[in-house]
Structure formats: structure tokens, C-alpha cells
Image (spheres, rainbow, N blue to C red):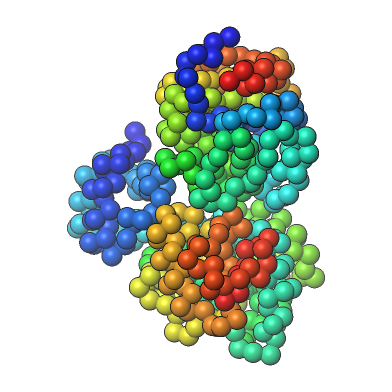
Amino acid sequence: MAVVPSLNDIRLITPVLEDILKLDVYNYALSFLRRRFAYVFNQLNVKSVDSFIEEIRKGNLVDDFLFHFQVSDTEMFRDPSFWRTLKNKVLPRYNAENLNIWIPDLASSHELCSLVVILKEDNLIESTQIYCSSPSLKIIEEVQKGCMLTKTLEVSKQNFKRLELQTSFEDYFVSEVGITKIDSSLFKNVKFINKSFFHQGPEENADIVLFRNRMIYYNSKLQNKAEDEILKYIKKDGFLAIGIKERICNNNVDLCHAYDHNEQIYQV
Amino acid sequence: MSTSRAKYYKGIVIGGSAGSFSIVSKILAHIKPDFKYPIIVCLHRLKHIRSGLLEGLNLKSNLQVVEPFDKDSIEGGKVYLAPSNYHLFVEYDSTISLSTEEVNNHSRPSIDYTFSSAATTYREKMVGIILTGANRDGAMGMFEVHKKNGYTIVQDPVTCDVDTMPKSALQLFTPDEVLSPEGIIDFLNKL
């Protein structure tokens, strides 16, 4: 029987997560927390809220919780028109420069793999330093393996075709004994930061930040805090990409302007 | 036909899949222009095609149809269409939240999720309408609407292009109404 936490249960869980994991979930959207805790409990075979809290207090389940709590990116090259816009309108500005790109809330390999493929296409992979932050070591380790999830592979391939590149999917991904992996050399300039972006930013300020579909799980207060934190690490004239159905908070609309409204790319 | 269960409603939620575009389009083309309730529409749609459906519905609709952004407020007299590749939830503060969480019944948006969240938020003050469709997504969500005493309408399976979705709902509970598309229009215009 699946455990679906009540609002009272959530009130019990959230201070424990903050105390033990230093994870502030108070300002996640409440309905999301109910769904996500239920999902995590199901994934971890949690029998009761009390037993979950006890395990977290003991230090067990901590990274497993962080791994499952994070909503994975749905697929590679989600919204192909976004990636086309990034390739055709944003990246050409950096042809002669070293480029820093930050993914503040790495959730799976999808966004990173999409990015390195685009950079390779544009011969920018060698001159680009990529930073990826995640509080979950397990997410980082999974991403470093470069394995693609079989269930999202087909839609990722279809998205790749829609990019209308000159190359093929197989130029970047190899399949061996049922596992599809990215060419590991594409991760050469990727630095992983095992911290929440709320607690630690990248070593150098970023030219481009990819933060798509992460703030939809926050309430307005946390969204504002997240934007403030991220904008601190974006260079002047740099870019922030958010999900196509997300909006920048009112408090920050003066700090950046819509560079591409359809794809929700903002310039600082 | 009984419409007296609630004196007023906070929202109308419509879910559908295969064949439902033309039904929703017909409903919106014939709904009275001063319809006062918000209508939230969740249709199964292709993940990678962002445009077309919204424009198609707006062509004939008497009400403005929008694809909401996350955290948008829900207002009466507007139609909110779930964007492609996002789940759509109705929140307690009458806003919409979107999500890229895992697919449900192979679907994102999932009709079950939209119905269930609306049932939790609106309880008896909602009307849930399930239309033609080729899978079971939506049936459990409508069951939640029924359990929360919301008003439930299932499209008459004999009028459906594909009757899997309405029949799945009918297997779970007895709805308040089983109506043809014309009956649904008539019902809504009398609210």
C-alpha cells in the first residue's frame, strides 16, 4: 500500500530534512511535496512516515532520498527549438572566447548530454568549461557514467532529428550490450559540484546558465531566492534559460530582459 | 437533468484523448460568451508540437483559450489548455502549477493528475467531464472527482470516436450524467 503523506506528515518531515540534509523544502509547492514524497516513498519502499524520518535521522536513505526527490529532466533535447535557438542565436556570440556554462540543479544526464552535443557541433567543446551542481552524489555518479535511460532514448533520438544537424545521433552515442552511452570525451571539461546551488556557486561566473523547469516546483518565495542566487553568478550580458512555461519573478524582471521570448532565454 | 447539487462551481475540468479535439472545439464554439467559470482542458497531445492545438481551439471558441504558465492565476471565463509535455495541476490558491514529473499512463499531460488535483482543490464545487479517448488515463481522476462529490459527466460512449476512456470511467463509478456532445454544451450553458 503506497504511503501518501498528509499535510501534517509534511510538517513533520520538512524540519528533519533541513536539520539532517540542510535541504530547505519549506518553500517547495505543497502539492508537489505531497506527490513527490509519495513517489520517493514508493521508490524506496517506505512503509510509514515515522520509519522514513527515523532512517533519515540515522543517516540512512539520505542520498537515495535526494536522488529520487529530484525530478529528472524528461528527455534529451527537450524542446528542440530551444536547442536550435541556443545554437543559432546564443552560442555564435562566443566563437572567439572561452565560455563558462552552469547547470545549477543537475537532475539527470539529459540536459548535460544535450549541451555537450551542441557544443561539439559548434566546435566549442574544447573552449567551454561546464559546471554542474547537485546536492546528490548519486545523481552526479549516474550522470558521470553517461548512460542513457532506455525509456527516454527514442524520444531523445526524435528530438535530435528535429535539430536538423548535419551529424547523426550515433556520432555522439554508442550502444553496447543494450546500454547507450555518450562519448565520454565530451565530458572532459565538465566539473561537478556536490552541493546545492543555494549553498555554493561555480568557481567562475557563467556566460550561460541552464535552469529549465526547476522553479516550477518552488513557491514564489523560493523561486525569487533561486533567481537571486543564480543571477549573482551570471556575467554581464550573459544568459539565463528557464523552462518555456516559467516566468522570471517580478522582483527580477528589471535585472534581465527576454532575449528570446518563445524559448524563455533571458539576458542579464 | 439535475444541476442543483452545487449552487456555484469553481471550475470545469475537461479531459480527452483520441477524437476529443473536435468535441472540445465544438463545446467552446457553442458555449455562451459570458460563461463565468474557468474551464481547464487536459488533452493528450504530441510532446514535441507546442503550437497548433491552442490556435485551433481559439479559432472558433467563444472564450479565450490560453496555455498557462506555471503559477498563473485561474480566472473565470477563460479556458486553460494543458501545455504539451507538462502535467497541469490545480492548486489550493486557485493557481496552476505545471510539472515535468514522470509520465502517468504513458501521458504527459496526464488527465488523471489534472482531475485529481482539481477534485482535491474544488471538491464538490467542480464539474468533471471526460470525453472520447483511447486509453484509461482520466478514469481514476474522474473517480476522485466523484468521491469528492464533484459533478461528473461522461461522454456517451456511442458518440465517441474511441470509447476506451469513457468506458473505463463508467467501470469505476456511476456518473451524474452520460451525455452526448450536444448534451454537454446544453448542460454547461445552463450553469
Q: Is residue A111 above or below residue A126?
A: above
- Where does the N terminus of chain B fall, quadrant-wise? top right
**Residue that protrudes farthest toward the front in the picture:** B34
Point out residue B30 in the picture as x, y percentages from the top left corner: 73, 25
**A19 or B188: which is nearer to us?**
B188
Tally of marks: 0
**Residue at 78 percent of width and 39 percent of height:** B59
- Looking at the image, which is closer to me, A183 or A105? A105
Position of the C terminus of chain B, as image quadrant, is top right
Question: Is A212 drawn above or below residue B122 in the view shown?
Answer: below
Visible in this render: residue B46?
yes
Q: Residue at x 47, y 79 (%)?
A: A233
Say left or right for B6 vs A60: right
A171 vs A50: above or below: below
Q: Residue furthest top?
A: B1
Q: Quadrant of residue B15?
A: top right
Residue at x 26% of width, y 60% of height: A18
Residue at figure coordinates x 23%, y 48% from the top left: A12
Q: Position of residue A137 (x, y in %)?
A: 38, 68
Question: Can the viewer see residue A208?
Answer: no
- Give coordinates of residue A159: x percent, y percent: 70, 58
Horizontal arrangement in the rendering, residue B185 relative to residue B6 (left or right): right
Whether B33 is drawn above or below A250: the answer is above
Give how far across and how far down residue B58 sits, in percent.
Answer: 74, 40
